[in-house]
Image (cartoon, helix red, strand yellow):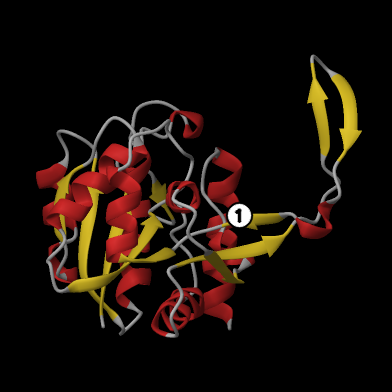
């Protein structure tokens, strides 16, 4: 089974600050998307890779990522538009598809490998997860309406993995936007399986996250 990967890197990253799109924000002196692609290429099982770039920056990212044998194409206004475009650009021989966020640039290879192993074992869709550590309350208009039982709550990460025909069906079905691809598969009534995620697979969203990511990189050098 050939594993293809779609790397979502078209986000504007407004919460990171203005001036530079998220994919090109620097982490320890290099663009975030470069760290992400290096991480992907550290997984031997991953074959063809399609990077969904911000509109107007396709050529810039293609030059930047040329050493890593990836195909760069324009993403869309919404995440689902980008992934749908990426599916069209992914070679037909890729029958397993991973969808990954460039913002989770430090995801360890072991997470990719766990997702791929679950797919090859027969799962239709796979997501890496972590238990919820904090107390979670439901709040409306600054008023606490209740405390959720966190024992069966999980934080979902990427890469998320899918049998290609399942992901194709999920994106072909009309419906509202979803925050991840697994939610689209859930709407089909298909089973989504979980594997353990990693604390290092956090999403870089705010300036503080860049500080944490830089610390993670330094710790890897010291190991």
Q: Quadrant of residue 116?
A: bottom left
Q: Mark 1 points at which residue?
A: 212
- Closer to the camera in the image, 221 or 79: 79
Q: In which quarter of the image is residue 80?
A: top left
Q: Report the number of discs.
A: 1
Q: In this view, does 184 lie above or below 63?
A: above
- Which residue of the protein is positioned furthest toward the front in this rendering? 189
Helix, strand or loop under label 1: helix
* Quarter occupied by the N terminus: bottom left
- The image position of residue 27, as x and y in percent, is 43, 53
In this image, 56 relative to 170: left or right? left
**Which residue shows up at 58% across the image and 50% down it?**
211
**Which residue shows up at 39% across the image and 48% down it?**
26
Q: Quadrant of residue 206?
A: top right
* Quarter occupied by the C terminus: bottom right
Whether residue 31 is visible: no
Q: Is residue 54 above or below residue 34?
A: above
- The image position of residue 153, as x and y in percent, is 74, 54
- Closer to the camera in the image, 56 or 25: 56
Q: Is disc 1 surrounded by few (<14), some (14 to 19) or many (20+) residues within 10 Å?
A: some
In this image, 62 relative to 133: left or right? left
- The image position of residue 130, as x and y in percent, is 67, 63
**Which residue shows up at 35% across the image and 79% down it?**
42
- Which residue of the protein is positioned furthest toward the top in this rendering? 141
**Which residue shows up at 44% across the image and 74% down it?**
112
- The image position of residue 24, as x and y in percent, is 31, 44
Whether residue 10 is visible: yes
């Amino acid at each position: 089974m050939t594993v293809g990967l779609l790397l979502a890197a078209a986000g504007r990253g407004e919460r990171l600050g203005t001036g530079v799109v998220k994919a090109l924000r620097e982490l320890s002196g290099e663009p975030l998307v470069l760290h992400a692609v290096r991480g992907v290429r550290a997984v031997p099982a991953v074959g063809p890779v399609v990077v969904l770039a911000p509109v107007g920056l396709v050529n810039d990212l293609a030059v930047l990522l040329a050493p890593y044998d990836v195909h760069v194409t324009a993403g869309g206004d919404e995440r689902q538009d980008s992934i749908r475009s990426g599916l069209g650009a992914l070679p037909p021989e890729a029958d397993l598809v991973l969808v990954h966020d460039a913002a989770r640039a430090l995801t360890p290879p072991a997470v990719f490998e766990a997702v791929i192993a679950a797919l090859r074992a027969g799962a239709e869709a796979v997501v890496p997860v972590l238990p919820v550590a904090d107390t979670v309350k439901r709040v409306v208009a600054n008023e606490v309406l209740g405390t959720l039982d966190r024992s069966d709550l999980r934080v979902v990460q990427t890469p998320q993995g899918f049998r290609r025909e399942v992901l194709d069906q999920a994106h072909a079905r009309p419906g509202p936007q979803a925050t991840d691809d697994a939610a689209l598969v859930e709407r089909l009534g298909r089973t989504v399986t979980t594997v353990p995620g990693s604390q290092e697979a956090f999403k870089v969203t705010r300036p503080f996250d860049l500080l944490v990511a830089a610390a993670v990189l330094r710790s890897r050098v010291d190991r």
